Structures are given as structure tokens and as C-alpha cells.
Amino acid sequence: MYWDGTVIFGLITVGLMIVFMAGWIGFIVRDSKRKK
């Protein structure tokens, strides 16, 4: 049980980090394209 909770929590954390990084990179790309 503890291991399952830890794995699920880790997957959620990694997923949120990936989504955050993807959104941040997308925002930078969109901003740079807008400046051009």
C-alpha cells in the first residue's frame, strides 16, 4: 500500500512537472514568434 501510494504520488508529480515544463516552453516559443 505504501509503495503504491508513493509510486502514484511520484507519477503525478512527474506528470505535473512535464505539463508545467511543456507549457513554459510553449509560452516562450509563442512569445518569441510573436516578437518576430
Image (cartoon, rainbow, N blue to C red):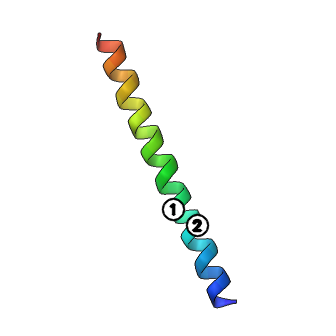
Identify the residue at image location x=60%, y=77%.
Answer: 7
Instruction: Please name the residue that numbered disc 2 is placed on.
Output: 11
Percent from the top left, x then y, of residue 1?
A: 70, 89
Does 33 appear above or below 24? above
The C terminus lies in quadrant: top left
- Image position of 29 (left or right of 12): left
Q: Position of residue 3 (x, y in %)?
A: 62, 87
Residue 28: image location, x then y, percent: 35, 30
Residue found farthest to the top: 36
Provide residue 31's location: percent of width, then percent of height. 35, 22
- The three-letter amino acid code for the residue at tag 2 is Leu
Q: Secondary structure at mark 2?
A: helix
Residue, disc 1 = 14
Disc 1 vs disc 2: Cβ atoms closer than 8 Å? Answer: yes
Q: Residue at x 55, y 57 (%)?
A: 15
Three-letter code, disc 1: Val
